[in-house]
Image: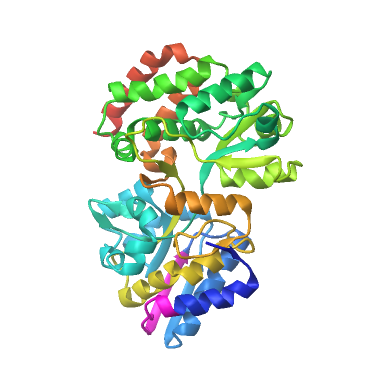
Amino acid sequence: MHSMTKRTLAALAACTALSAPALAQVSGDLSIFLDTSNPAPRATMEAMIERFGEKNPDLNIEITVIDREAYKTQIRNFLTANAPDVATWYAANRMKPYVDAGLFDDVSDLWAEPMFADDLKSTKGAMTIDGKQWGVPYTYYQWGVYYRKDIFDELELSAPTTWEEEKVNCEKIVASGRACYTIGTKFLWTAGGWFDYLNMRTNGYDFHNQLANGEISWEDDRVKQTFANWKELIDMGAFIDNHQTYSWQEALPFMVNGEAAAYLMGNFAVAPLRDAGLTDDQLDFYQFVSINPDVELAEDAPTDTFHIPSAAKNKEAAREFLRFVASPEEQTIINDGKNLGQLPVNSKSSVDDDKFLQKGFVMLSENSPGGVAQFWDRDAPAEMAKVSMEGFQEFMVKPDQVDKILAKLERARGRIYK
């Protein structure tokens, strides 16, 4: 892996041209629907589609861009009534309703090709339902623990790799008069991130997915163990006070001011932390520690995807477009800092010369054998996600109510997954 510069792009394109299969020429009409309505992602997608068009001069490409929130309410209608050939969406449970309704095409044939099978394997689980693949990812970003390296240095701590090391570090941080972690749970998804990591580290990715799918009781002893691990941190005063009154942004100053040493968050937190004055010498990152050594490490890495609707008219050109999107050179270009500023899903791509993107790429491409989850509010059905995340927030405030909270979530499971 190397940092991407303008000079290396040409070299990369030359190398990958040798290793990647030659894309077939396609013709006819190709309709693409995008939810990338913000200016930078829109420009990135339009430029990528233009490059695809240049390779396929006999193809007439029509792009429709829909505002992201409006897209969410319109997708079922357009997949049913007047389907495009390619449409953007999200991985895992977010694609399940359209898979179950027969509205997305099975693209397992693509995933059998060497580039997908070898270079995109970290995301395969997120694209798989009932043993088949239903789309192709084009970008994702890592979650993990962003921490104040200068505070760790002052307290003579190193980045932990095990649960015991995490707790010992935390005790020393609390003893120094600081919180171990900042968090704002006013909007509930941040507590969902903690639940994801603690549950995947305690019970593994497959168990986590089964729980999200309603197949496991919330009163199962294995779920209780996840909460018991979480309670160890809460009981030692690991989290800032009154976190339920802060948004995730409002929790940032605790880390900037040195009142908290770390933040479990997505990579989007880096820019505001830098803007607030933290330097890359002060700020560092580590992968959430191992808790159960029998469990392979899985990560939260929300993934944006392309799909071929079942009613698409030009599926040959659509498949060729998906191959193009996933290619190492396109993955390098669209995810660089001037474009999406996220991580390529192809392990043969180059990554922007940013410390945190570099670390995230290595972690997701090489050090996450357990799989890639999409985040609790994408993996669980919307109603269950809401009820359970309310429970996570309540638990963080009243950890002694855990049995009552889990009983409530179990009742909700019985109702929601009927």
| Quadrant in which the C terminus appears | top left
Q: What stretch is highlighted in magenta?
A: 18-33
Tell whether 275 sits left or right of 361. Answer: right
- Determine the residue located farthest toward the front in the rendered image: 156
Instruction: Answer with left or right where residue 34 lies relative to residue 23.
Output: right
Seen at 70% across and 25% down, the residue is: 259
- Residue 268 is left or right of residue 49, and the answer is right
- Describe residue 225's horizontal placement relative to residue 181 as left or right: left
Count of picture labels: 0
Residue farthest to the bottom? 58
The residue lying toward the viewer, choosing from 33 and 332, is: 332
Q: Nearer the viewer, residue 275 or 307?
A: 275
Question: Residue 253, how many percent across, how many down?
Answer: 71, 32
Q: Does the magenta-highlighted stretch encompass residue 142?
A: no
Displayed quadrant of residue 154: top right
Say how the picture is coloured. Answer: rainbow
Pick the front one: 170 or 181: 170
Q: In which quarter of the image is residue 230?
A: top left
Q: Where is residue 241 in the image (x, y as percent from the top left)?
A: 62, 19
Q: Where does the image place residue 18, in percent across and percent down from the top left?
A: 43, 80
Q: Where is 291 relative to 135, above or below?
A: above
Residue 76 visible in the shown view: no
| Residue 180 visible in the displayed image | yes
Residue ID at (48%, 81%): 53
189 up-or-down from 302: above or below: above
- Work out which residue is located at the far top of the displayed protein and give it: 400
Q: Position of residue 403 (x, y in %)?
A: 36, 14
